Amino acid sequence: MKKLKTDMRRALGAALIAGMFGLPANASGPEESEKHEAHVAKAPKSIAAAVVSVSDLDAATEFYTQGLGLTKVRSSAGENYKENILATEDETGTKLVLIQTLDGEPKIGKARVVFNTDDAAGMMQALKTAGMHVERDATPISKNVPVIIGIGHDADGNTLEFIQRLQRTKMAR
């Protein structure tokens, strides 16, 4: 079982890295390269956010904003969580999401990395092909929001979220 997890982790890592550089995932021959291209999506464009689970959202937000100079750009809440999204001064780079679980243990795993991508469905397929768990297939947030989100997990339980932002015209289709 440990060898299988290691092999799956290597396969996903190789597929994602190869996709980033436009390389075949396996240099053993064209047949393997063709298989690779059939299931690996275009690599993510950038990391959108890093998500950190905290025990006290207000105290953590105060530390990161007043202590480190980040800016709170928005807040969000659901039935079992509340979160603040923080940014650096220019607000264009990777966001830091502080999330507090309100009911029980944090459910985001050891870590959560949020990627921007042009192909959320392809990224979910890459996770499935590597034998990883997909929590949420790439689906729109809602009918009127031009964003598709897919969520999966790596072999160590880390959460990987893929966000695909659509143009409004694509949503009408």
Image (tube, helix red, strand yellow):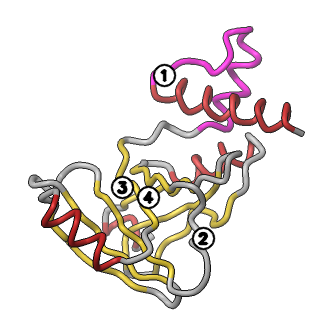
CA distance separating discs 1 and 3: 24 Å
What residue is pinned by disc 1?
22
CA distance separating discs 2 and 4: 19 Å
- Check the image and name the residue furthest to the bottom: 79
Q: What is the three-letter code of the residue carrying label 4?
A: Ile
The residue lying at 79 percent from left, 38 percent from top is 5
Circle on res. 38: none
The residue lying at 42 percent from left, 69 percent from top is 54
Q: Secondary structure at mark 3?
A: strand
The tag earlier along the polypeptide, 4 or 3, is 3
The tag earlier along the polypeptide, 2 or 4, is 2
Q: What is the three-letter code of the residue carrying label 1?
A: Gly
Q: Position of residue 63 (x, y in %)?
A: 22, 66
The tag earlier along the polypeptide, 1 or 3, is 1
What residue is pinned by disc 2?
107
Residue 28 occupies which quadrant of the picture?
Answer: top right
Nearer the observer, disc 4 or disc 3?
A: 3
Residue 9 occupies which quadrant of the picture?
Answer: top right
Q: Position of residue 73 (x, y in %)?
A: 19, 70
Circle on res. 163: 4
CA distance separating discs 1 and 2: 34 Å
Q: Is residue 111 left or right of residue 33?
A: left
What residue is pinned by disc 3?
49
Residues drawn in magenta: 21-40
Q: What is the three-letter code of the residue carrying label 2?
A: Lys
Nearer the observer, disc 1 or disc 3?
A: 3
Q: Residues within 10 Å of mark 3 (few under 14, many from 20)?
A: many
